[in-house]
Image: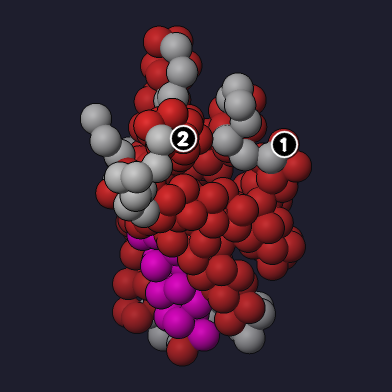
Amino acid sequence: MNDAPRLPLTGAAIGVAPMLVLGYAAVRLLDPGGRPGLAWTASHLLLLAAFVMFGLAIPGIGQTAARGGRTRRVVAVVTAVVAAVGVFCAFGQTLTDIAVGLIATDRAGMNVLFHQIHSYPGVGLAFGSIGPILFFVGLPALTALLAAARPPQMAAWGAVAVAVGALLPVATLDLLPLAALLMTLGLAPLGWRLTHATRLARSPVPASEPSAVREREAAGDR
């Protein structure tokens, strides 16, 4: 299957997503107490958009990571599914945060609403303590597969930056700005490479060129 049409979307989403997370972290600093209001709503809308971008990027990242043998394809598909489930859960968690912020009038009211929502069976696990973490495990695992590919599809330092950036918010949200910067640095070259490779693949090759040259360039684009 030709996945080239999806690569521009993947490359753009990879570049935009961590910058949206950085925007979320910056706006969040305006209200460190996490109270209902403009800062809460605006920051979480940025985070919601970030998870949309990550959701758009994961299929393309998974397809890129799956290029290889059967075992590698299976591992890449499973890892991409885990990351996608995590994105869905994180999206739901963020949507809940926005709704609670719009309904409640103070932090105490938000805490009551959060407790009520998470008291439903499975909701707390899916959209709170476990589900979103799958994304922060799945994305670094995908980038590790890209870095371990032969030839590498991503620099090793980029995969390390993404892994550290994904783990920092799990420890504490106070490190979110640093985490977003690391993920931006780690993912930006991958986004550029996927977009650039797609443009090369779509560039017409003059019919007058020797067939061997055309075949060699086509192989390089793949």
Residue hosting label 2 = 213
Q: Residue drawn at (46%, 18%), measured in percent from left and top?
A: 68
Q: Which-is-in-front pick, marks 2 and 1?
A: 2
Is 129 situated left or right of 174 in this image? left
Camera-nearest residue between 144 and 39: 144
Camera-nearest residue between 192 and 104: 192
Residue range (magenta):
39-56
Dominant SS of magenta comes to helix
In three-dimensional space, the C-alpha distance between marks 2 and 1, rounded to whole angstroms, equals: 30 Å
| Label 2 crowd (10 A; few <14 / some 14-19 / many >=20) | few
Is residue 8 shown to the viewer in this render? yes
Q: Position of residue 177 (x, y in %)?
A: 69, 67
Task: Find numbered disc 2 in the image and state the secondary structure of the residue it sits on.
Answer: helix
Camera-nearest residue between 216 and 120: 216
Q: Position of residue 138 (x, y in %)?
A: 50, 35
Residue 199, compared with residue 80, is above or below; it is below
Residue hosting label 1 = 156
Residue type indicated by callout 2: Val
Q: Check residue 55 for magenta coloring.
A: yes
Is residue 93 shown to the viewer in this render? no
Q: Residue drawn at (45%, 55%), measured in percent from left and top?
A: 195
Q: Check residue 34 for magenta coloring.
A: no
